[in-house]
Image: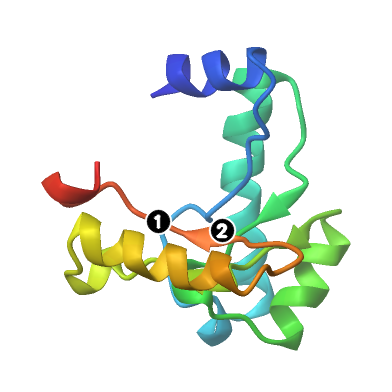
Amino acid sequence: MAARVKYAYDHGHQVASHTWQHLHLNTLTEHELQVQMWLVEEAVYKITGAYIAFTRPPFGEYNDLVLEVAGMRGQIIANWDFDSGDTGGLSGEQSLARYRTLAAGHPESILTLNHEINPTTV
C-alpha cells in the first residue's frame, strides 16, 4: 500500500485522507477526531514527506466539530456532490446514465463519489 501511495504522490496526484478507521465522524469527540486525522497524517507524511490538505469524511458525514478539528489541523473537508450509485448496486450502465443526465445540465463543477467494489464498475 505504501508503494502505491508514494507512486501516486510522485506522479503528481493529491493524497488526501479518508480517516484511519472509516468511522462516523459526526459521532466522535474532539480527541477521537484528532486521533483519526493524526494517524493518516503521520502515515502519509512518512511515505511522501507531505502533509494532508483534504479529508473526505466517511459516509459524507460531518458536523461543526469535524470542521473545527480539520481546520485546526490545516485540512479542508471535501465532500461529493454527485453519487454514481455504485455502492447501492447500480450497474456500470446505470451509473453512466446518471453521469450523462448530470452532464446534460452543464454544472460548473462535479465532485463525484465512485467506488471500485463491483466487477461492473471497475
Q: How is the image coloured?
A: rainbow
Query: Considering only vertical position in the picture, is 102 above or below 28?
Result: above
Q: Amino acid at mark 2?
A: Gln
**Residue 23 placed where, x, y %?**
43, 70
- Pick the quarter of the image with the N terminus: top left
| Mark sitting on residue 49 | none
Q: Nearer the viewer, mark 1 or mark 2?
A: 1
Q: Tell me the residue that label 1 is attached to.
A: 114
**Few, some or many residues within 10 Å of mark 2 (<14, 14–19, 20+):** many
| Mark sitting on residue 36 | 2
User: Which quarter of the figure has residue 92?
Assistant: bottom left
Tell me the element at label 1: loop
Along the viewing direction, whichever of 56 and 112 lies nearer the viewer: 112
Query: Considering only vertical position in the picture, is 76 above or below 2?
Result: below
**Residue 49 placed where, x, y %?**
74, 20
Left or right, residue 118 beside residue 77: left
Left or right, residue 39 beside residue 31: left
Of callouts 1 and 2, the N-terminal one: 2
Tell me the element at label 2: helix
**Residue 9 placed where, x, y %?**
63, 21
